[in-house]
Image (tube, helix red, strand yellow):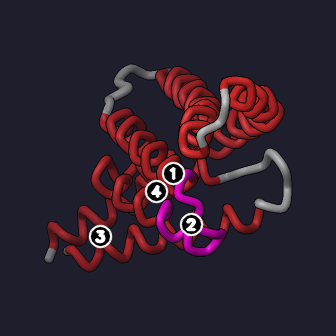
Amino acid sequence: MIAKRVALCAVSVALLIALQYTFSFVPGVELVTVFMLCFCYAFGISAGMIAATCFSLLRCLLFGFYPNVLVLYLIYYNLFAILFGMLGKKSWGRKGAAIAELLTVTALAVFCTACFTLLDDIISPLFFGYTAEAAYAYLKASIYVMIPQCICSSITVALLFVPLSKVFKSAAVYKFYREKKL
């Protein structure tokens, strides 16, 4: 059972790394948010935090080790896993709640995307000892990066949340069913 959990998280991390690498050449476009969101939503907090931590560490090994980025990724993606892992446990109940669920998840994904940049605007200046003026300039420059990322998150989550969640949830149900049968 532990080996299955490790394999599940490893496949998720490999997919996240591949997505980040593939779209790293296109400014403002990223699919890590929607894939991590759907994974945490379907498999819960613990699997999400394992995947988030492994992704953060492996990403820094592959793309270059910068301590401020490592701290940013470890904090952000683990909080992200907790939020969407808890949200995935929520029962949306009534019929027609799918739209409310999609709107809620999309709004939270955009909010989290903005928080990622804002958290970087706190961590990096503190880490590098920026002056107040330099920190403000860093904040202003990051806004132009945050806007296309938020737009991308809103579009990708709105379009991909439902199909990806179905795939991940069916894998989670299959995994649960197989473990009960053994």
Residue 28: image location, x then y, percent? 80, 45
Residue at the image point whose x is 35% and y is 24% from the top = 93
Q: Which mark is residue 60?
A: 2
Residue 82: image location, x then y, percent? 35, 40
Contact between labelled residues 2 and 1, with CB atoms less than 8 Å apart: yes
Q: Mark 1 points at which residue?
A: 73
Residue at the image point whose x is 47% and y is 66% from the top = 57
Tell me which numbered mark, 1 or 2, is placed earlier along the sequence: 2
Locate residue 179 relative to residue 21 in the image: left or right.
left
Q: Which mark is residue 168?
A: 4
Q: Name the residue under label 3.
A: 5
Locate residue 101 relative to residue 51 in the image: left or right.
right
Locate residue 70 relative to residue 120 in the image: left or right.
left
Tell me which numbered mark, 2 or 3, is placed earlier along the sequence: 3
Q: How far apart are marks 2 and 3 (CA)?
A: 23 Å
Q: Distance between the residues labelled 1 and 3?
A: 22 Å
The residue under label 4 is which amino acid type?
Answer: Phe
Tell me which numbered mark, 2 or 4, is placed earlier along the sequence: 2
Bounds of the magenta segment: 55-68
Q: Is the magenta stretch mostly helix, strand or loop?
A: helix
The residue under label 2 is which amino acid type?
Answer: Cys
